[in-house]
Amino acid sequence: MSVDMPLEELLKYNGTNARPNDYDEYWQKALDELDNTAPSVRLTPAEWQIPNFVCRDLWFHGVRGGKIYAKAVRPAGTENTKLPALLLFHGYSGASEPWQYMLGFAGIGFEVFYMDCRGQAGASYDDNGNRGRTHFGTLMKGVMDGDPQRLAFRHIYLDTAQLARIVMNLPGIDPDRVAVYGQSQGGALSVTCAALEQRIAYCAPVFPYLSDHKRVYDLAFPVGVNEEINYWFRTYDPQHKREDWLFEQLGYVDIQFLAPRIKAKTLMMCGLKDTCCPPSSQFAMYNKITAPKQLRVFPDFIHETLPNQADEMLQWLLPQILA
């Protein structure tokens, strides 16, 4: 049983948060800015190494001064082989997993890239003179500037596209065989990466975050994005005089409106008792994908790693990407 809608209604749900009227123009302008941002790629041997694999540190420039880091791992002895690539994205306020997490994917035959989001717990950062993590608040960062082009998640979404462009141009990668995978915020970034870099071939979001913010707020579950929005209202708008304005701002970084851009084959996994990323918010995004797509539903699971989720993803992905 779902915490907010029966499955048959979820499959028809089209979202609550209003789509900004200039949404397409907003993201085209963002992509134009990315086009004019030199990536300045540095790919060097990592300090951490292990037999049978090549581990490298990838640094590149994102928009607005971002310095972005990703781990890269591929099987040793494949330097002259064009491998498929798997791009991984982490959960909210976190960082890329330790190197050993990537070895299983690399052992299958991928080069694996795991990006740290700027301003969170990893190595990536904004070049503004202030280093260090923000555990909470990325969603609302930039809202008070009154200019949606300054929203923090706009820049992070563009970082995912910049990473994909860089990977696709590497000599050891087959650009036609690139997949994206992550859960929660990582699921959302898998969606944005596939939407903003439409050459991505396979997209596997697991309970994606950052969709249908107004619906999540209306459900009033006391976790996740709701906490940040509640804090914002209590601090800056206790009578909700600017409620419509706030959700219009957040609409620019609402992934449900990027979903129609996806051309990748897509697999989404969802726990129907998730109160952090409620199922309806996830389906608002999923239902807008027009590319070939599949769904795996876990009726009794909350916002948690789902049983065998990586195995499910690989069973779906490998026959296609390694064919």
Image (cartoon, rainbow, N blue to C red):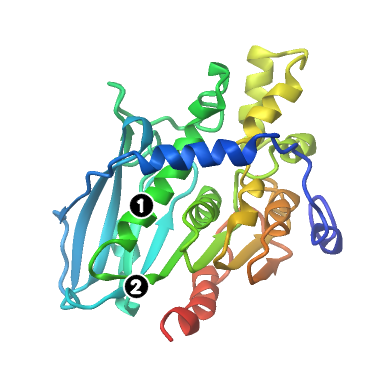
Indicate the position of residue 31 as horizontal and vertical percent values: 46, 43
Indicate the position of residue 91 as horizontal and vertical percent values: 48, 48
Using the image, determine if residue 116 lies above or below residue 120: below
Using the image, determine if residue 15 lies above or below residue 102: above
- Of 9 and 146, nearer the camera is 146
- The answer for how far apart the CA atoms under marks 1 and 2 are is 21 Å
In the rendered structure, which amino acid carries the disc numbered 1?
A: Leu
Element on which disc 1 rests: helix
Location of residue 11 (image quadrant) = bottom right
Q: Is residue 271 left or right of residue 183?
A: right
Looking at the image, do the residues carrying marks 1 and 2 touch, with CB atoms under 8 Å apart? no
Element on which disc 2 rests: helix
Q: Is residue 84 left or right of residue 313?
A: left
> Which badge, 1 or 2, comes first in the chain's sequence?
2
Q: Give the residue pinned by disc 2.
A: 104
Q: Give the residue pinned by disc 1.
A: 163
In the rendered structure, which amino acid carries the disc numbered 2?
A: Gly
Using the image, determine if residue 153 lies above or below residue 276: above
- Of 53 and 214, nearer the camera is 214
Location of residue 323 (image quadrant) = bottom left
Q: Residue at x 84, y 54 (%)?
A: 5
Q: Residues within 10 Å of mark 1 (few under 14, many from 20)?
A: many
Q: Is residue 105 left or right of residue 184?
A: left
Q: Residue at x 82, y 62 (%)?
A: 7
Of the 4 image quadrants, the one containing the N terminus is bottom right
Indicate the position of residue 318 as horizontal and vertical percent values: 46, 80
- Of 109 and 258, nearer the camera is 258
Q: Residue at x 50, y 75 (%)?
A: 311
As drawn, the label of residue 67 is none
Res. 285 visible in picture: yes
